[in-house]
Image (spheres, rainbow, N blue to C red):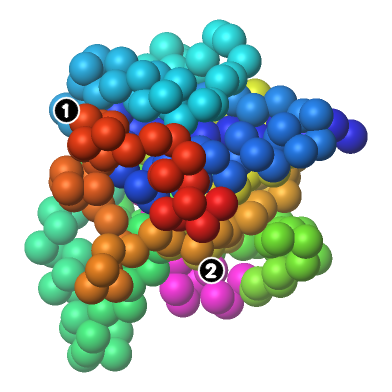
Amino acid sequence: MTITTRFAPSPTGPLHLGHAYSALLAFDLARAQAGSFLLRIEDIDRSRARPEWETQIYDDLHWLGIDWQEPVMRQSDRLEIYSTAIQGLWDAGLLFACDCKRRDILEAASAPQEGGSPVVGPDGVVYPGTCRTKGLKFGEGALRLNMPKAVQMVEQSALQFVDDGRVVLFDKQDLLDSVGDIVLMRQDMGTSYHLSVVIDDAAQGVTLVSRGEDLREATKIHIVLQRLIDLPSPEYLHHKLIRDDAGKRLAKRDDARAIARYRSEGASAKDIRRWVGL
Ligand code: GLU
């Protein structure tokens, strides 16, 4: 099987050293095995995505010496595909609508019967299940995955993924306790990161997803979704995060580490490779 990797940035700010590492790693992995490297623009958050950032991404990646197969996939072109998947999950009774506010969730998750302090999972505070039995209609709120139902639908033996060549197993209880009823459709987006990423990695035929280790827990969500919507699972490689001098991971707003900034200061792509340890 030939390898296909991808880099999937969101055009919501400048690419920084952490993105450069992630993109270069995925590109190198594909090139080392004469495979394909793909680019996907994750622009479902219309309130934050900007065309200028998208242009800057292409520019920075080219400058880094990266090229990719055309056409580039853009998530904002695929909203109908996500909505069909959402409808299928809704029809299968796997979703429920939720009109809780962030504050309600935090309060309910902090109640004494929930243990007093909220559990934070890969998608934020683990949802306390408030709306699961409320019977709200489609459209009456965000749509959440009914995790207790979802775990009934998947085989325990299917709850595993390959991470950097090693098999990682996780169990249903873990999903209930530390992931919970995650949002699969935000009302303002018509989809969510988790749903789109799973559908698109499959649509692009990605065989190896390399991305930051901050997403390792989220991979459990992606495996469950792949099982529920019957999609193949790629292999994964969760790589180190590039941190600033104080050891903090870089954020989009870290303009000081923006590739564009290094470029304007006369650095070369080779310098960037060296700084990130490639
Ligand atoms: N758009 C996501 C990000 O920039 C992609 C994460 C992933 O690679 O799955 O964090």
Q: Residues within 10 Å of mark 1 (few under 14, many from 20)?
A: few
Q: Which residue is mark 1?
A: 47
Amino acid bearing label 1? Ser
Q: Which x, y percent locates residue 60? A: 37, 26
Q: Position of residue 53 (x, y in %)?
A: 25, 23
- Residue that lies at the very extreme toward the right in this rendered image: 1
- Do tag 1 and tag 2 residues touch (Cβ < 8 Å)? no
**Which quadrant of the figure contains the N terminus?**
top right
Q: Residue at x 56, y 52 (%)?
A: 278
Q: Residue at x 46, y 30 (%)?
A: 64
Front position among marks 1 and 2: 1
Can the viewer see residue 88 in this picture?
no
Residue 175 marker: 2
Magenta span of residues: 172-183
Q: Residues within 10 Å of mark 2 (few under 14, many from 20)?
A: many
Residue 138 as seen in the image, left or right of residue 237? left
Which callout, 1 or 2, points at the residue further toward the start of the chain? 1
Q: Is residue 263 left or right of residue 48?
A: right
- Whether residue 116 is in magenta: the answer is no
Place residue 66 in its image quadrant: top right
Q: Is residue 179 magenta?
A: yes
Question: As shown in the figure, which amino acid type bears the numbered disc 2?
Answer: Leu
On the image, the x and y values in percent for residue 20 come to: 43, 41
Rendered view: 122 above or below 259: below
